[in-house]
Image: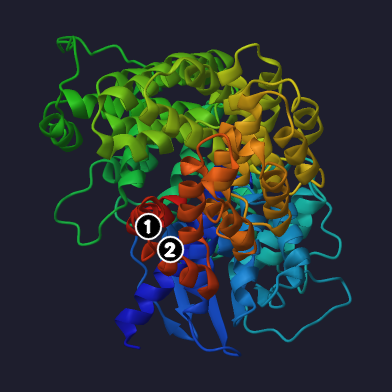
Amino acid sequence: MTAGDRDDTVVRLLSDLEALRRSLRLYPPSHPSLQPARERLRERVLALGPDGEVITASFAPGRLFWNGQEVALPPFTPAARLIPLLFHLGLAAVRLTLPEAAEGVVELATRLAGLSDRPGEADRAALVEQGSALPGVELVPIDLSGVQLLGSQESPARTGSRPVWAELAQRLSRDGAFPLSGLVHEGEMSPGSVLELLAASSDPETLFDHLFRQLAEIIRASSEARRPAALAEVREYFAEVIRLLDPERRTLAIATAFRHLPLTAPNDPWVAGETLLDAVERMLITGVAIPKDIQKVIQLLAAPSPERPQELPDELVIRARHLMARIQLEAPTREPPPGERRSLAANWSATPCVQELSESLGDEQIRLHFIRLLQEAITLWPGEQIAEQAALRLAEEFVAALDVGDIETAARLAPLLAATRSDEAVRVFSQSGVEAAVRALGTLDKGLHPDLTAILVALGERALPAILTALESEESLTVRRRLLEIVTRQGPTAVPYLRPQLDDPRWFVVRNAVFLLRRIGSSEALPILKSRVASCHPKVLTEILKTLVSLQDPDWLRLLEKTLDSDDPDRRRVALEVASRIHHPDVVRLILDRLRRRLGKGLREPFSLELIRTLGLLRDPSALETLRQIVALRQWRYPFLLTAPRREAAAAITHLEGPAARRVAISLASGKDRNIANAVREAMHAQPEAREEDE
């Protein structure tokens, strides 16, 4: 395998792992769309190598190594989002043992789905603790043995003096604001000691404020010659402290450091990317002024220069633009100096980001941007009033998209609406949205029906009542089949909505409910169905008997026999129709017994002909002798015509399996009785078509 092929395989595997993790956060574990994702992930793992091979994936911030070789990680793939999460969870590596790891990786995705995107200490501890239960997967935590929290009696070998560490220890000890007993070793305060000091503090923000103020004083107090070295040491110290903190406290620490330390230069920020933006957003929320140097960095992120060699992710640029707009909105206004003319409106037209956006926007693009904005509002403020209003507007956009045939937009919105907490939005998409989708099934090209079906399935359980209501009144057979498929794909979730329909006075509603219960495989309603056998509508009876047989109810044969002996010819005909599809020796015995009882005068009844046809459909060779007796009957012994029963018996013999039946059929086809010979030839000619229809 070449390096390029290896990289593609690894990226696809991790991308599928991230996709399954995110899907598990959106959908319940039993959702139909999750099983294909699980199977695809298992296949990716099994394709890595032969059984018994052990593969190691190790992580660093923004980097991935596969069996010790670095993998080229494209910046915009799901795999690139997964690596920082694994690193923040405290994982140095993951070892996979094939083939057991196929199930273990799927279970790992389930564990990761239960954690937050910004994991804390509890998340890390839970994942590492449960990691031993993953088959074929070993989680290797980051080794922090090099970070030492020193007691007063411990004295490891020193690796060299660090003036900033010593100066910081002296300043903190002098202030007496924090208990430093056991934390200062040989006159120095290491970054690892800050964690222990933080654990003992009830006010982390005050501790950070005091710590970074002292570091800033160390820089200012240094001589001109010493200042660059002091700045470099403080920068190194700050980076080490940040590295050891969990994500939440890291954001707090950076936001606090912005008040004191010269953390950024326009082209060389001490922290960058998402970490920088998280800290700025916290400062905006808490009302802290953003330093000018930080604002310059945000401006560079919001409007990256085309000459810059490295590319920034689109998500980072968009977020930086939003933050820049908030910074400018919240900046205090100043009175213009005398003689300066105040502009009534800011001129944004020359801004690169505005020019880029203006050139790309049309009516459809504006609508798509608006939908994305609503999605962000729901994601960022799930419990706020704005999320309620955004969900309602998304539901209205969903209905509008279906009405105009914009299936792509409707498919994008359906999973998001299925997870919304807004009752009003649920009402809109489960009523108007389902009605619009059903209309689309009846009017749009059939090539779009699978997409419309997937949309209605994605709406989930809350759309089921409206779908069942639409099924009750739908006249198009094609649309009814699609609606039945949609309910079936919801699985056991649909059963509570189907059981009340068994008591509906309309027979076609009950028939649909029984059919769906059989397709879903639910046996909960079998006692109710058995109690209705004697009194239900004949078309409902057909579905009930099929359901009893399909779900292997122990009473199916007894109830079928009881229906065969009913006084109602319609119910007997239903029983024969169901029996003709059950290739079971006991069913053949039931039909033969009732036909033998009619070998006399009973052959004149239409039900006898139906019994003969049913034996032909069942094709069981045990019926050959009885059918031969009927063919051999002589007309002079009976006061009614035997032409019809003899012809039906001859045709049924043609359909029976086995060499004996075939020999008899050939003999009858060449016999002197022209009526019988013609019946056999016609049956032989139609037999392949009949077999195909039966299958």
Q: Are marks 2 and 1 in contact (CB under 8 Å)?
A: yes
Compute the Cα span from label 2 to label 1: 6 Å
Please tell me whether residue 372 is drawn above or below residue 124 in the rendered image. Answer: above
Residue at the spot x=32%, y=39% of the render? 318
**Residue 570, which numbered label?**
none
Residue at the spot x=35%, y=88% of the render? 1
Q: Amino acid at mark 1?
A: Ala
Secondary structure type for disc 1: helix
Residue position marked by numbered label 1 in the rendering: 677
Residue position marked by numbered label 2 in the rendering: 668
- Residue 542 in the image, given as x and y percentages of width and height: 61, 33
- Residue 414 in the image, given as x and y percentages of width and height: 44, 31
Residue 450 seen by the camera: yes
User: On the picture, is 298 further left or further right than 361?
Assistant: right
Give the class, few, some or many, for how many residues have Cα within 10 Å of label 2's Cα (few <14, many ≥20). many
- Residue 196 in the image, given as x and y percentages of width and height: 78, 59
Residue 170 seen by the camera: no
- Name the image quarter holding residue 636: top right
